[in-house]
Amino acid sequence: MTPAKILLNLALPAAILIGAWLLVPRAAELPPSLAGIKVYGVYFVLTVGLLLALVFRRGRIVFALLTLALAYLCYGVLVRDGFAGFRAHTLFAALGVFVPLNLALLCLLPERGTFNVHGLQRAGVLAAEVLLTLWVIYAPATRITAWAISPFIETTLLAASPVRQLGWIVLTLGMATSLAVWIMRRVALDIAFAGAITAFALAMHLVGDANTFAVYLAAAALIFTIALLQDTFRMAFRDELTGLPSRRNLNERMMGLGRRYTIAMCDVDHFKKFNDTHGHDLGDQVLKMVAAKLDEVKGGGTAYRYGGEEFTVLFPGKDIEHAMPHLEALRASIEAYKIAVRAPGRPEKPEPSTRRRGAFRDATSVSVTISIGVAEHTAELATTDDVIKAADKALYRAKDKGRNRVSE
Ligand code: GH3
Ligand code: MG
Ligand code: MG
């Protein structure tokens, strides 16, 4: 992941949080005719997000938004209670613990959809939290609430915050967890969890200020919703295995090409045999390596996964002469790259008594080569289809001449 992409990932939640911060004072200035926004705005954002998450089958986002919806319902009760009394104290403490806990857990858990046994389990956890909170309120289990709101250590840090130490501990752990998950996986959706927990922490901390809770809660929901759209967009235009732009992306790009462009079709040599010898998993790993090398193409080229073990490199605005040395560099760098593998037949963890010697002892390495066919847009090759067909023919010539070469 490049620094630019990291910044781009961080930019979305940051922009929404800043937007929320700017919006809070404006919310008070809303004319009476728009007062409905204050009442229904959060429900609107939550509903749109929930519908999108259901349509795109993102159970993690569904349950994250349900958690936020429950939190907003609780906030309504807090306002009615005037933030005073046992019920209000219990509800507020429960929010500070369960919301960041749920969001952090959902960030850690894999995507498993909504309407299945996993969804049922996750809904069960939400229901258990609600029941536990109701039980504390109506039992009434005053000792539990007293424990949750009493300080664990003597400190003046955040002493003025309505959120008590337990809440800050869980909120901080939740933010740290989701940040760590994002740093490890580098998926934009994970940073949304960190952003949403941060928005929720601000909502809780500033709960006494008018309109603040609603605006920051809506911000949290918006962070999830936009991240969901981003992720869906990425899935549509990126190839899942290699991360390269997909063929659909190539087709769109080709519609907007000018008069000069060059297309190269690249195909891994003897890949069927490679799969048969080393297995499909190592084959996949090799495709990822080839894709990563092709992605480094210089000279204004862009690499796409065309399908299977075939890739396309497109040079908009460039002729063959310009593209040739860059394609030759790609061919050479893939030929030179060695992937370390366990020697065939070597078990993953050999028993000491059966440990083999000699040929099987050392890790070996494998490598592949690619053949490339190139064609450019001319008067005869008038459409992108024609150019691709010509590049394909050139690719056959490269294969015929013995593979591991670039042909025009
Ligand atoms: P040539 O040098 O003529 O290109 O020979 P080849 O074996 O590469 O050509 P062929 O088109 O017959 O075989 C392509 C093989 O690529 C078939 C399939 O096993 C493999 N392949 C296609 N897509 C994938 C994939 O996503 N992962 C893996 N591991 N293998 C794939
Ligand atoms: Mg092929
Ligand atoms: Mg091939």
Image (spheres, rainbow, N blue to C red):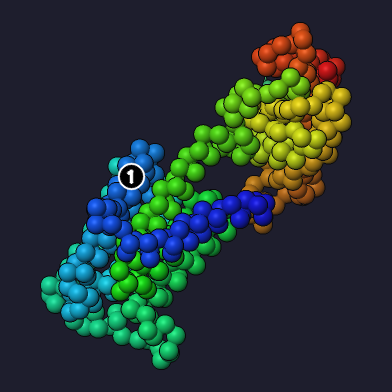
**Label 1: which residue?**
48
Q: Closer to the camera, 332 or 389?
A: 389
Residue 263 in view here: yes
Q: Position of residue 325 (x, y in %)?
A: 87, 31
Q: Position of residue 301 (x, y in %)?
A: 75, 33
Q: State whether residue 266 appears in this view.
A: no
Residue 396 image offset from top left, x and y in percent: 77, 15
Q: Is residue 333 left or right of residue 383?
A: right
- Quick one: which residue is furthest to the bottom in this view? 154
Q: Which one is nearer the viewer's eye here, 206 or 128?
A: 206
At x 73%, y 49%, the residue is: 356
- Residue 313 versus residue 133 in the image, above or below: above
- Name which residue type carries label 1: Val
201 relative to 241, above or below: below
Q: Is residue 343 above or below residue 157?
A: above
> Which residue appears at 66% of the width and 31% of the height?
304
- Name the residue located 17 percent from the left edge and 69 percent from the top edge: 80
* CB at disc 1 and ligand 1 closer than 8 Å: no
Please name whichever residue, 162 or 192, is drawn nearer the observer in this view of the structure. 162
Which quarter of the rendered picture does the C terminus lie within?
top right
Locate residue 262: give its quadrant: top right
Residue density around tag 1, few if under 14, some if 14–19, many if 20 or more, within 10 Å: some
Task: Name the quarter showing ligand 2.
Answer: top right
Q: Position of residue 394 (x, y in %)?
A: 79, 16
